[in-house]
Image: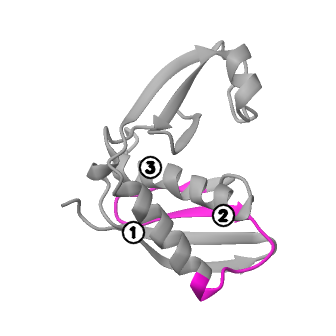
Amino acid sequence: MAKSYAPRMHSAEHILNQVMVRKFDCGRCFSAHVNKKKSKCDYHFGRALTDTEAKEVEAAVNEAISSNLAVTTEVISLEEAERDFNITRLPQGAETVRIVRIGDYDTCPCIGEHVDNTAEIGTYRMVSQDFNDGVLRIRYKLGNPE
């Protein structure tokens, strides 16, 4: 059975990750489950978000989405990737790395499918978040793009 892709959700995951990095310096999610209807990201974190922080994260994600940023890809050498990115999740023997750029907002190695522009994502809504054993889980949905 072929893998089902959700380019809108996956692109939103990249933006959420960058918001978390910028706001909390916690690093990108270490685990994500991306579906068309609802997705989740897990972060190594010390606590749950406050209601205010959750609203700020949601607003920051939506601000980036509404900036109509182009989403592009390029392939770089493994040596270049080692200088700029965490490549521990790359398969053994990789010689090149695919980089996904969301405007000047986010850049990271990724093999997934994405939108061409953030205007295609729709409105991000954090539906819940909880904290257990050092893991902050954020669940989100997307509204239809306008």
- Given residues 122 and 134, the one toward you in this image is 122
At label 1, the amino acid type is Lys
Residue annotated with mark 2: 23
Residue 85 pos. (x, y %): 70, 33
Residue name at image x 49 percent, y 33 percent: 100
Residue annotated with mark 1: 141
Q: How crowded is mark 2: few (under 14 residues within 10 Å), some or many (20 or more)?
A: few
At label 2, the amino acid type is Lys
Q: Which of marks 1 and 3 is nearer the N terminus?
A: 3
Q: Earlier in the sequence, mark 2 or mark 1?
A: 2
Q: Residue 4 carries which label?
A: none
Q: Earlier in the sequence, mark 3 or mark 2?
A: 3
Q: Is residue 138 above or below residue 66?
A: below
Stretch in magenta: 32-52
Front: mark 2 or 1? 2
Q: How crowded is mark 3: few (under 14 residues within 10 Å), some or many (20 or more)?
A: many
